[in-house]
Image (spheres, rainbow, N blue to C red):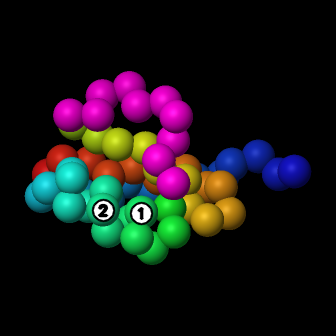
Amino acid sequence: MRPQRGHVDFDVPDLDAGEAAVLALGATRHEVQPAPDSFRVFLDPIGHPFCLVRA
């Protein structure tokens, strides 16, 4: 297994709508959510993390 080499953050105007969109596309919500009112952490279908950040 190779270590993670990058991390992508996406600015979204509405975290709830953004979450619904990425979940519909196959992402899963990460179990750790340090600041869910400001940003949310997800995993893509193969396990790479990314965040949605309130713009």
CB of mark 2 within 8 Å of CB of mark 1? Answer: yes
- The structure residue drawn at horizontal position 76% and vertical position 46%, both measured from the top left corner, is 3
Q: Position of residue 18 (x, y in %)?
A: 26, 61
Label for residue 51?
Answer: none
31 vs 34, nearest the viewer? 31
- Of all residues, the one furthest to the right in this rendering is 1
Count of numbered tags? 2
- Residue 32 visible here: yes
Q: Give the main secondary structure of the magenta stretch.
A: loop
The residue stretch that appears in magenta? 28-37
For mark 2, does the 10 Å Cα neighbourhood hold few (<14), some (14 to 19), or many (20 or more) residues? few
**Quarter holding residue 22:** bottom left
Q: Is residue 28 above or below residue 34?
A: below
- Of all residues, the one furthest to the bottom in this rendering is 25
**Quarter holding residue 37:** top left
Q: Position of residue 20 (x, y in %)?
A: 30, 62
Amino acid found under the numbered disc labelled 2: Ala
Q: Secondary structure at mark 1?
A: helix
Q: Is residue 23 magenta?
A: no
Q: CA distance from mark 2 to mark 1?
A: 5 Å
Q: Which residue is mark 1?
A: 23
Q: Secondary structure at mark 2?
A: helix
- Of all residues, the one furthest to the top in this rendering is 34
- The structure residue drawn at horizontal position 52% and vertical position 34%, both measured from the top left corner, is 31
Amino acid found under the numbered disc labelled 1: Leu
- The structure residue drawn at horizontal position 51% and vertical position 69%, both measured from the top left corner, is 26
- Residue 7 visible here: no
Q: Is residue 32 magenta?
A: yes
